[in-house]
Structures are given as C-alpha cells and as structure tokens.
Amino acid sequence: MVNEETIWAALAEVADPEIPVVSLVEMGIVRGVALDGQNVTVTITPTFSGCPALHAMQADIVTRLKALGCAEVRVETVLHPPWSSDWISDEARRKLKAFGLAPPPPHGGHITLTFFDPVACPYCDSTNTSVKNSFGPTLCRAIHYCHNCQQPFEQFKPL
Ligand SMILES: [Zn+2]
C-alpha cells in the first residue's frame, strides 16, 4: 500500500551515503513527498552542494520506493533554501556523536558565532579542542583535535 505515510517510512530507512548511521530523513535532506496515483516525486536538499554522494542518494531513493510499489519515482534537488545543519533531528545528532562525529550545534542562522565556539569532543565531551584542518575527508566535515583524550575527531560543520 503506497501512501505518503509508507513513503516517509521507507525513506526513513535510506541511509545517508556519507554517514550510514543516519537516514536521509533524520538529516533533514528529504524535504517533501508528492504522490500522484502510484507516481511519487521526492524533493531533496543535499547537505552541501559539493557533496559527491548526491547520485548515490538519488539512486537509493528510487530503488527503495520502487521496492515499495511506486511506479515512477522522480527525485528533485532543491538548493533554495540551502540545507541547514539545524534540520538534523535530535536523534540523528545522538547517532552522529556515537559514530564519533561531533554533531553541529544548532545555530538558528548565526553560523559565524557557532563556528568559533569550542567543539565538544564526541568521545569525552571536553571542549579543550582545536581545529586541525577545516577540510576533512568531505567538504562537510572539519577535523578537530581533543587535547583532553588526545584524539583527532571529525565535526559535521554547521551550515
Ligand atoms: Zn576527547
């Protein structure tokens, strides 16, 4: 039975290709679902326009929704308004932290303020940390170093 509810439930099972512990819905990437008979259009806003995972994301959505019984699946990318790390759910923030990725602090639009705030280490919660490199393995992440437990860790940048 395909309806908006089952579609959202199916999308909640599609993992973020970059961070497989969280789903596209939890990350706030899926913005909308429009159903027309058995055809569905999913609107997504990628976390960062440079993220190379976009094609994987679109393919995963199409595969999952066709398996659910949708006839045609269209994935539309919307870049305005740009994705905000404020859209990450609380549950996803906990999962990111458990994954060793410091979640971005909610900023309410004041990114420059939070960008200079000390970032809490996901392992020991110490804020005695410093930025090592503002470009991690992907453009979405920054590498920090914890002076307390002496471990490098990544932070999902506030956007
Ligand atoms: Zn630490």
Image (spheres, helix red, strand yellow):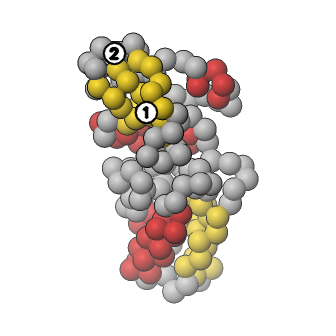
Q: Position of residue 57 (x, y in %)?
A: 48, 65
Extreme residue in the front direction: 133
Note whether ligand 1 is within 8 Å of mark 2: yes
Q: Position of residue 137 (x, y in %)?
A: 43, 46
Q: Quadrant of residue 34?
A: bottom right
**Disc 2, disc 1: CB below 8 Å?**
no
105 w.r.t. 18: above or below: above
Question: What residue do we see at 69% from left, 56% from top?
Answer: 79
138 w.r.t. 10: above or below: above
Number of labels in the image equals 2
Q: Quadrant of the N terminus?
A: bottom left
Dot 2: element: loop
84 w.r.t. 63: above or below: above
Q: Position of residue 64 (x, y in %)?
A: 41, 73
Q: Which numbered dot is residue 129?
A: none
Give the crowd class for mark 1: few <14, some 14-19, many >=20 residues within 10 Å.
Answer: many
Quick one: 63 or 144, which is closer to the camera? Answer: 144
- Label 1 amino acid? Ile
Residue 90 in view, yes or no = no
Quick one: 44 or 130, which is closer to the camera? Answer: 130
Task: Write down the residue under mark 2.
Answer: 147
Q: Position of residue 43 (x, y in %)?
A: 62, 64
Question: What residue do we see at 26% from left, 18% from top?
Answer: 149
Dot 1: element: strand
Question: What residue do we see at 44% from left, 81% from top?
Answer: 66
- Label 2 amino acid? His
Q: Quadrant of residue 29?
A: bottom right
Task: Write down the residue under mark 1.
Answer: 143
Quick one: 107 or 13, which is closer to the camera? Answer: 107
The CA span between labels 2 and 1 is 13 Å
Question: What residue do we see at 47% from left, 73% from top?
Answer: 59
Give the crowd class for mark 2: few <14, some 14-19, many >=20 residues within 10 Å.
Answer: some
